[in-house]
Structures are given as structure tokens and as C-alpha cells.
Image (tube, rainbow, N blue to C red):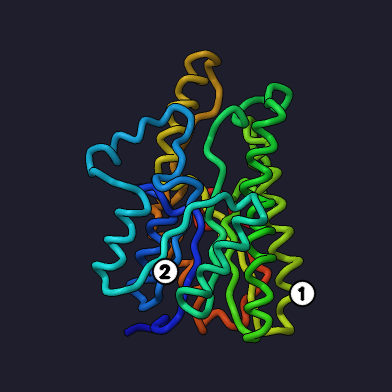
Amino acid sequence: MGEFGGKSVLITGCGRVRGVGRALSVVFARAGADIVATDVAPGGTRNENEEGLEEIRQGWKGLESLAAEIEGLGRRILTLVGDVSRAADAERFVAESLRRFGRIDVLVNNAAAPHGADRRLIWEVPEEAWDLVLDVNLKGTFLMSRAVIPHMLARRSGRIINMASVSGKRGTPRRGAYTASKFGVIGLTQSMAQELAPHGITVNAICPGSVDTSRRESTTRRERALAEREPGAPVLGLPPTGRVARPDDIARLALFFASEQSDHVTGQAWNVDGGAVMS
């Protein structure tokens, strides 16, 4: 059945066809886990300048299609819709997961705000755009973790994996809100790791660089448009490995953080970026 047979993994932000949430769900299911997959809408949310053509071509129906994929692997899946930045929804996700599977062994805080008006010079960022990014990326991580921790404390075991970013280690222009949120996620990871280590619970963060998802499509279009308006503006380049990350690259590290092999690893923020940021 695999290392995760009989275990349950709760993953947020799973609605997109070319997303890390889908890759996480598939990797854990192949390892034997039952999956709880959530998103703010059945098909997730699209980013600025992103048309979702791949999903149209594939006939992707968001969480419904993901459920069929996971069931095709012989695993059970529960799909839930709600907003991780709302305490009531976070608590409902945990309660319904426990009602369905009786346990939550791993929480992966993967949900992230879509690219939008936050991708501006900081003095041009609307307050509501700032709030959306911080609410989903940072507050959502806090609320989901807070909701699941009492269950893990009672069992004296568990894994919490937070999706940060290399932008949480090095600030970048036109990403002030995103950078602030991811620095916050790394700090929250370190604090929770210290609080939960005596209870058999580890907390780690994954820091992707550029990943070949729908978000990259949005970023590429935005930066090309910026380069046309402002010659010499930075554009996406390739890291030393010569390629951007694939969603599976991220998912495999999450699998390690969730496994018994990582028992003595906690409070860490590991880059998955092909060597673009070395720290």
C-alpha cells in the first residue's frame, strides 16, 4: 500500500490542472494516503493575464477532475470548497476531514492568492490587493495550522508543511506583498516548529523558485509587458540547472518532509529552485 497507507493528508489550493496542489495530491495518493483537497472555488482561481486555456483543452473540472484522478489511483478523496483566510472555513475543513477519515497525519498549506494588483511597485499596490495576499498566504497558513494542531497534539504526532518561496528569503521588486507574506510564512514555520517539537510534530517550509504552473504563465506575460514598457527591466531567466521547477519537484520534497525519514528535520525552509537562490 505504500508508506502512507492508512494515513490522511489535507492539502489546500488544489483546483488547478497545472498546479502544485494537484501534484501534491497525486504524489501522496501514489504513496498510499487518502486525500482531502480544498480550494476557494471548485476550479481554483485564475491569475492576472492568465486565460486557463490548458484547462479548457483538457476539459479539467477542478476538484471534480482531481477526485476522479485520485480515485483512479485506488485512494479515497474528500473535496471541500472554502476560504483558508476565514477561521470558520479552516475549522470546517479540519472537522470534515476528521469526520471522513478519522485522522489528519499531514497538513500541507499550499493555498496562495492569485497574481493581481499586488504585482506593482509598492506605492502603487491597492490596500485590498495587499490584504488579499497576506490574508491567504500568511493568515490562511496560521488558521489552517491552528485548526489542525489540537488533533495532532492529542495524537502526539503530525506533519505541517508550509509553502513559502525563495521570495521569503530575498526581497524582489514588484512583489512586496508576496515577499512579505512568504517571509512571514518562514517565520511562522520556525515558531511553530519550536512549540510543537516536544509533542512529536514537525513543521517545515518549502521555498520554490519559478515553477511551471499557471502562475508562471501570468508572470511571463507580465514581465514581458514590463520589458516592452521599460527596456532593461528584469525578466524571468533560468537557474543553474537550466530549467524551472516542475510541480512534481515540489511534491517530492513535501513527501520527504511528511515521511519518517524526516523525523529529525523541523523548522527548516528548503529551496527548490535549481540553485537560483543559494542559502
Res. 242 in view? no
Q: Is residue 172 left or right of residue 249?
A: right
Which of the marked residues, 2 or 1, is nearer the chain's N terminus?
A: 2
Front: mark 2 or 1: 2
Which residue is more in the foreground, 62 or 179? 62
- The residue at 48%/67% (across/down) is 253
Above or below 75: residue 183: above
- The residue at 46%/77% (across/down) is 101
Q: Position of residue 214 (x, y in %)?
A: 40, 40
Q: Position of residue 218 (x, y in %)?
A: 45, 33
Q: What residue is pinned by disc 2? A: 35
The secondary element bearing badge 1 is classed as helix
Question: At label 1, which amino acid type do we have?
Answer: Glu
- The residue at 51%/47% (across/down) is 40
Above or below 255: residue 132: above
Res. 253 in view? yes
Which residue is more in the foreground, 122 or 40? 40
